[in-house]
Image (spheres, grey):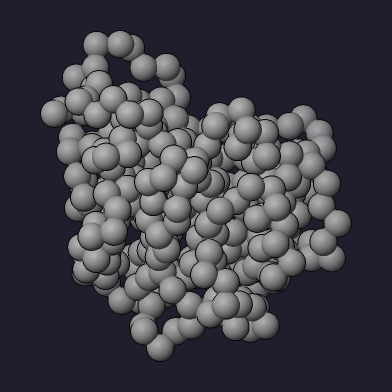
Amino acid sequence: MPADADAAPAPPHSAEGTTGSDTAPCLRILLVGDIYARPGRRAAAEWIPALRRDRQLDLVVANAENAAGGHGVTESIVRKLYAYGVDVITTGNHVWDRAEFLPQLQRQERVLRPLNYPVEAPGRGSIVMPTRAGQPVAVVSLQGRTLMHPVDCPFHAIQAEVERLRQLTPIIVVDFHAETTAEKAAMGWYLDGRVSAVIGTHTHVQTADDRLLPAGTAYLTDVGMTGAQDSVIGVRPDIAIERFLTAVPKRFKPAEGNVQLNGVIVEVEPATGRARRIERLQLAAAAGGGSDDDREP
Ligand code: FE2
């Protein structure tokens, strides 16, 4: 069943597949791109509850590895994200930034660290979540290793994990937290037909290559950042520029001001796990966003 044979023209920010034999309503899964510091949390507070309601979402996944001041995440922020409507939190290389949070990776099964760390690392890389519609959805946090801190091979790690998860559910969403476009694109093709979606995170700028791959996997190289619009991938521009000009290390501080939420909604056939539609979201507020009173910047 080719995914790209639909006669109807797709709207500008979505890709649609064919109408298959599965007539049950699709599950709608939202993945919110890297929530960065307080501006990202304000954007999450502003939009996630409304999206959850208005788009009738079955599952909300958010990458929150930079949600606490741009460095890691905290227990109180995790609780807030749950309250906004997030079901599963994915992470990446920054999940280790706060030592006090590491025990939470053992306790909070809905907070994932990348799958392909050594087994001795705390936490877990996947979860199978029940949904309102009845069909469980598996979520995997996975990390690339090209131009990143060395970790185990993501391709070998995900192969074994997908085989295990497919015994439990055909609906599998992979957050691939990686630096290079090529590694992400290769992962999309590697998993095509075996998972419902491969969505990239980490580079903080949304790419425009959303599509359904031929065997039915929704793919996007990077979903983008949820945080301050007037920033260098979330950081105050003056600090980022100074670092480039001087090459002297200086701790980044999060930018403030206008906020944006970048995300992607994937619609999936419940019986097969095949993606039927992918839609990029770029929501921006001229001012404000929701409130966040956490002591973290
Ligand atoms: Fe990252």
- Is residue 262 found left or right of 163 in the rendered image? right
Quarter occupied by residue 82: bottom right
- 150 above or below 225? below
Check the image and name the residue furthest to the top.
8
- 185 above or below 286? below
- Is residue 63 found left or right of 272 in the rendered image? right
Tell me if residue 161 can be seen.
yes
Quarter occupied by residue 4: top left
- Is residue 83 found left or right of 280 in the rendered image? right
- 12 above or below 29? above
| Residue 272: image location, x then y, percent | 24, 40
Tell me if residue 186 can be seen.
no
Quadrant into which the N terminus falls: top left
Residue for point 52% across, 51% down: 61
| Residue 261: image location, x then y, percent | 62, 40
Residue for point 36% across, 17% down: 10
| Residue 188: image location, x then y, percent | 27, 48
Check the image and name the residue furthest to the left.
1
| Residue 221: image location, x then y, percent | 38, 45
